[in-house]
Amino acid sequence: MHAGPRLIAVSRHDDELRQTAMHRHARGQLLGAYQGLLTVYAGNRQWVAPSRHAVWIPPGHLHGLRSHGPYAGYSAYLNPAACADLPAAPCALLASPLLLAAVDRAASWPDDASDPARRRIVEVIRDEIRSLPRAGAALILPRDPRLQRLALALSDRPSDTRSLDEWAAAIGMAPRTLARRFLTETGLPVGAWRQQVRLMRAQEMLASGAAVTTVALELGYDNVSAFIAMFKRELGVTPGQFGAAGD
């Protein structure tokens, strides 16, 4: 017997900011935004999810999130038995209109009764989670405490422009060792990791209505054009187009 209904879905359209401390639960959770931007933390990973993405958190995985800008979103919780053949690690998916429509339908159910029509909706959601293309990779925090201190400092202040040698001195590690271990533990060089943090923070700020020039300067760019070029190269749209899409 399954513990409780196979699916519980909820949606919210109140535009209030959302912040959830790190936690875990027995059910798998699919979550996303109809409007706004989410920063999601899962284990040692973090990523930014715009409204075109959905995030899958398998049962038992530690996770938390916060929203940026006006927010409306959804969550669908699947019991452990329904998660058996779904992704075993947290991931971001490219949400489809079919997935969003199925979650909306499930969120409208007034009770947890089960009938053939509802079971088909649950299977549609499961099929979409299983088969939708993955979105951008998560940003990984290093395991080494000294490197993690560096990474968290960059996350708090992506405008920090200290060189590799300066960071090595600050955390008490040889520059070559720092560079080698950081790449091994995160998959990215320090500079590329910092750029991804800047990109995440830029999306957060733009979703909150900040001007492009303000974002560029607060992220440590002296040249606004360089910031715009980086943003377009990484996301395929300019910061101005990204901000307008969230209006």
Image: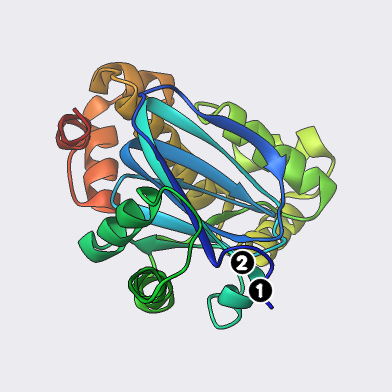
Q: Residues within 10 Å of mark 1 (few under 14, many from 20)?
A: few
Q: Position of residue 89 (x, y in %)?
A: 60, 69
Residue 126, compared with residue 55, is above or below; it is below
Separation of marks 1 and 2 at Cα, in angstroms: 7 Å
Q: The C terminus is located in which quarter?
A: top left
SS assignment at label 2: loop
Kind of element beneath mark 1: loop
Asked if residue 212 lies left or right of residue 58, the reply is left
Q: Nearer the viewer, residue 224 or 152?
A: 152
Using a 10 Å C-alpha cutoff, classify the residue at mark 2 as few (fewer than 14 neighbours), some (14 to 19) or many (20 or more). many
Q: At x 36% / y 72%, what residue is drawn? A: 128
Q: Nearer the viewer, mark 1 or mark 2?
A: 1
- 49 with respect to 210 (left or right): right
Identify the disc placed on residue 132. Answer: none
Mark toward the start of the polypeptide (1 vs 2): 1
Q: Position of residue 98 (x, y in %)?
A: 24, 65
Q: Residue at the location (79% across, 50% down)?
A: 174
Looking at numbered disc 1 in the image, what kind of residue is underneath it? Answer: His
Mark sitting on residue 2: 1
> Which amino acid, by three-letter code, is at mark 2?
Asn
Can residue 192 be seen by looking at this rendering? yes
Which residue position holds label 2?
79
